[in-house]
Image: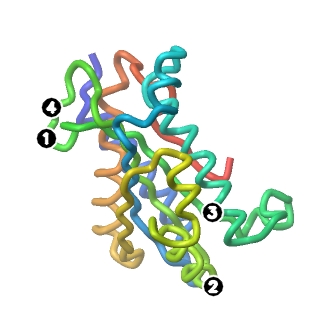
Amino acid sequence: MNNPHRINEAYAEYFKSWFLEHASRGTKSYFVTLTFEHEAQRRQRRQAEGLSRGAFEMKAFDHLYNLISRRLIGRNYHRSFNQLRLPRVAAFLDAEGSRHWRCDGELSNIHLHTVWIIEDALTASFEEAMNMNGPMIDAWRSLSFDEIDVREIDSGSEGDVSTVVAYASKLIGFTNNELSLGRDFEIYPR
């Protein structure tokens, strides 16, 4: 049996190197936690359709990433000439209890921890878009997001970066043995 602590250490080291590779001068970094409405009809319907645990949440984040990218870069955000301007994001599923290593059995309160790397010129638009009472309120509701917590990361502090990516990716060690989630993390742009 693989040791969840060692798996998490390996993933944290990988995601730290990913972060340091993409964060540079002229970018800002954010740690964003997204929670979902527990009783959302869309979420319940998706689970009843037999989707794997976490699939609804990751699909909602796919949509959110595309909406944010379009808002920041424009209608042609997905074109090859805009690829370098797209936000670099690592998105991780998490569940209640994983912080204190009590994540055995059924995963409850699935939510997302995400790390965003944004061009300095786009940060004001990003912060405005991530405001749940701002211009994207209808999108937030349609995707069943309940709450959002945005915190800036000190990109110059390797200790801060290590702490953030280790915390965000901590569920991976738990789900490694039984593969109870369809995708437990994703890197954007894909």
Query: Which of marks 3 and 2 precedes in the sequence?
Result: 3
Residue assigned mark 2: 121
**Residue 100: percent from left, percent from top:** 13, 41
Question: What amino acid is labelled 2 in the image?
Answer: Ala
Question: Is residue 62 depicted above or below 45 in this figure?
Answer: below
**Residue 51: percent from left, percent from top:** 52, 20
Cα distance between the residues tagged 3 and 1 = 32 Å
Residue assigned mark 1: 100
Crowding at mark 4 (Cα within 10 Å: few <14, some 14-19, many 20+): few
Cα distance between the residues tagged 2 and 1 = 38 Å
Cα distance between the residues tagged 4 and 3 = 34 Å
Question: What amino acid is labelled 4 in the image?
Answer: Arg
Q: Nearer the viewer, residue 48 or 98?
A: 48
Q: In which quarter of the image is residue 135?
A: bottom right
Crowding at mark 1 (Cα within 10 Å: few <14, some 14-19, many 20+): few
Query: Which of marks 1 and 2 precedes in the sequence?
Result: 1
Query: Which of marks 1 and 3 precedes in the sequence?
Result: 3
Question: What amino acid is labelled 1 in the image?
Answer: His
